[in-house]
């Protein structure tokens, strides 16, 4: 049962985020955030002291159950990733790609292209691309922070504007319109954060004009990037590129087919609705197909013995436990905020209570959605709360013409907060896929994401007064490119002004 706790409801996510950034330790920070939320709930509900811990573990168990397919999928996927690495497929791909991708620019552009190509699911995007591209980044001495940023910036921002994705159906289902999918398509030009983030990724990859802590990470990158954990299982020297490519390709194809099957596509349901029904169940089928493919591919050729194959699966599942613990804690924190102490309702209440002009509505909604998503670590939870409210505001106040821009701003703000929140599952999976320290990924990504968000705020103000998305986008694009050039120039040392290629 949810209890309205007012402004106090924002304390748990703020505590978790502040502790994570200050201590550089995310596990205890999230745990304390969840605990503080339960303390607030128990005090307001006038329950016994022991109820704090009972509610906390109930919430964890509930979130594990709600996300059981996600847990199964990540375990299977990481088992496939570990097997592919042990087979020598990654080394072979690294040697092959090293000959094809001869520059830092080509390598980063190839990563961004893969990010756009794998648009079905953001979590799958993060883990798959990180696995495939990580050896090449290490070889070319490109920082893991840069890899984590590129895969994160081409995960949710791509999924939120891709018509065929689990995100599209989730958004369409929230719109109280006779044609929710059409409404989703109409929001794409108004989703300035997604569009400008992709523009920024392209610009950074081509020009190398980094700034802030990302620039420092690029300058300090070491040739000894590979961790001891990655080295402990020696890879086979007999692996080929297809030992990497075939399991991954089969996994992708079967994941799409699995999502369609689980959603009832082969029973007459439309494809877009089918893949959004239970996407992680379909992804689990795809991951299992990749595992079977690896068995058929490696065992008969004696790339590894059956005992080694099973041991690699166990090691792979074991290596996903630390990030899985972060996910469970972040899911629990989000559950406390949404289901128990009313964080989302408190923040969104500003929209319904304020008497504002429709010309600034997209800007205001973008800011509120960003704050909610950053605090709760979930874009789906944010737009799930805000979309019905935004729809009611626009329709009740006679601002139906502003509905689509407002919905676009809602989605954009939701993705921004999700993109840079340290408790977001996408942020966690990006650092996991790149095998980059999680807090380092957050520290280097926030300035990039926030720059785009500031530019978006200007763009939404322009949209409010011009009623067209393209002028807002062009204004934002010009401001973004100009800011990137100035920030890079300002942060450059005279001896280091030549861009590294």
Image: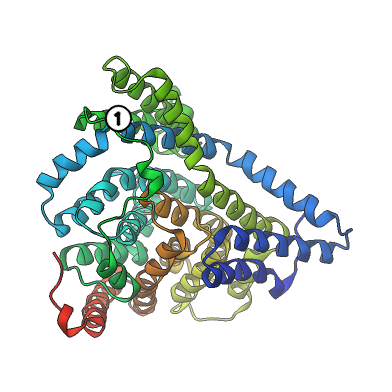
Where, quadrant-wise, is the N terminus in this rendering? bottom right
Q: Is residue 91 left or right of residue 127?
A: left
Residue 176 point in image, percent of width and height: 53, 53
- The reply to whether residue 341 is visible in this rendering is no
The structure residue drawn at horizontal position 51% and vertical position 38%, both measured from the top left corner, is 318
Q: What is the image's colouring?
A: rainbow
Residue 262 point in image, percent of width and height: 48, 28
Mark 1, residue position: 87
The structure residue drawn at horizontal position 63% and vertical position 57%, both measured from the top left corner, is 333
Quarter occupied by residue 93: top left
Q: Is residue 54 left or right of residue 77?
A: right
- The reply to whether residue 223 is visible in this rendering is yes
Residue 157 point in image, percent of width and height: 36, 57
Residue 227 point in image, percent of width and height: 37, 50
Residue in the foreground of this view, choosing between 330 and 478: 330
Q: Is residue 55 left or right of residue 375?
A: right
Residue found at the far top of this picture: 300
Residue in the foreground of this view, choosing between 311 and 90: 311
The structure residue drawn at horizontal position 69% and vertical position 69%, both measured from the top left corner, is 9
The structure residue drawn at horizontal position 35% and vertical position 54%, both measured from the top left corner, is 161
SS for dot 1: helix
Residue in the foreground of this view, choosing between 167 and 317: 317
């Amino acid at each position: 049962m949810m209890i309205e706790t007012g402004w106090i409801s924002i304390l748990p996510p703020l505590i978790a985020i502040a502790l994570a950034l200050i201590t550089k330790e995310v596990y205890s920070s999230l745990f304390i955030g969840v605990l503080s939320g339960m303390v607030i709930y128990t005090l307001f509900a006038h329950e016994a002291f022991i109820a704090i811990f009972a509610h906390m573990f109930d919430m964890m168990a509930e979130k594990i159950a709600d996300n059981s397919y996600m847990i199964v999928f990540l375990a299977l996927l990481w088992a496939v990733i570990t097997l592919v690495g042990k087979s020598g497929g990654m080394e072979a791909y690294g040697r092959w790609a090293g000959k094809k991708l001869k520059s830092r620019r080509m390598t980063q552009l190839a990563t961004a292209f893969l990010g756009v190509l794998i648009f079905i699911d953001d979590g799958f995007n993060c883990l798959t691309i990180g696995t495939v591209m990580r050896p090449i980044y290490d070889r070319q001495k490109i920082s893991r922070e840069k890899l984590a940023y590129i895969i994160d910036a081409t995960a949710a921002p791509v999924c939120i504007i891709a018509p065929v994705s689990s995100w599209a159906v989730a958004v369409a289902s929230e719109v109280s319109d006779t044609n929710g999918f059409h409404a989703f398509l109409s929001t794409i030009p108004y989703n300035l954060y997604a569009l400008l983030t992709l523009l920024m990724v392209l610009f950074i990859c081509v020009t190398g004009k980094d700034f802030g802590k990302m620039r420092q990470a690029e300058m300090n990158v070491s040739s000894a990037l590979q961790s001891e954990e990655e080295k402990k299982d020696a890879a086979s020297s007999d692996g080929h590129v297809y030992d990497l490519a075939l399991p991954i390709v089969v996994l992708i194809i079967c994941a799409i087919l699995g999502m369609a099957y689980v959603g009832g596509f082969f029973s007459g349901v439309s494809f877009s609705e089918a893949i959004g029904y239970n996407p992680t169940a379909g992804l689990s089928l795809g991951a299992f197909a990749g595992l079977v493919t690896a068995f058929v591919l490696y065992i008969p050729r004696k790339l590894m013995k059956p005992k080694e194959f099973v041991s690699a699966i166990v090691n792979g599942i074991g290596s996903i436990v630390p990030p899985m613990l972060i996910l469970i804690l972040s899911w629990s924190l989000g559950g406390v905020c949404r289901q128990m102490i009313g964080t989302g309702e408190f923040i969104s209440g500003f929209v319904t209570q304020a008497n504002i002009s429709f010309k600034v509505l997209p800007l205001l909604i973008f800011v509120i959605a960003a704050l909610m998503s950053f605090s709760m670590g979930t874009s789906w939870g944010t737009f799930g709360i805000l979309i019905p409210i935004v729809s009611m505001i626009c329709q009740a106040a006679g601002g139906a013409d502003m509905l689509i821009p407002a919905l676009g701003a809602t989605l954009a703000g939701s993705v921004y907060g999700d993109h840079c929140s340290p408790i977001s599952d996408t942020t966690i999976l990006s650092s996991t896929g790149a095998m980059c320290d999680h807090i380092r990924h957050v520290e280097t990504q926030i300035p990039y994401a926030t720059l785009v968000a500031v530019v978006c705020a200007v763009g939404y103000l322009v949209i409010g007064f011009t009623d067209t998305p393209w002028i807002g986008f062009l204004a934002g694009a010009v401001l973004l490119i100009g800011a990137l050039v100035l920030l890079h120039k300002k942060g450059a040392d005279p001896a280091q002004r030549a861009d590294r290629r």
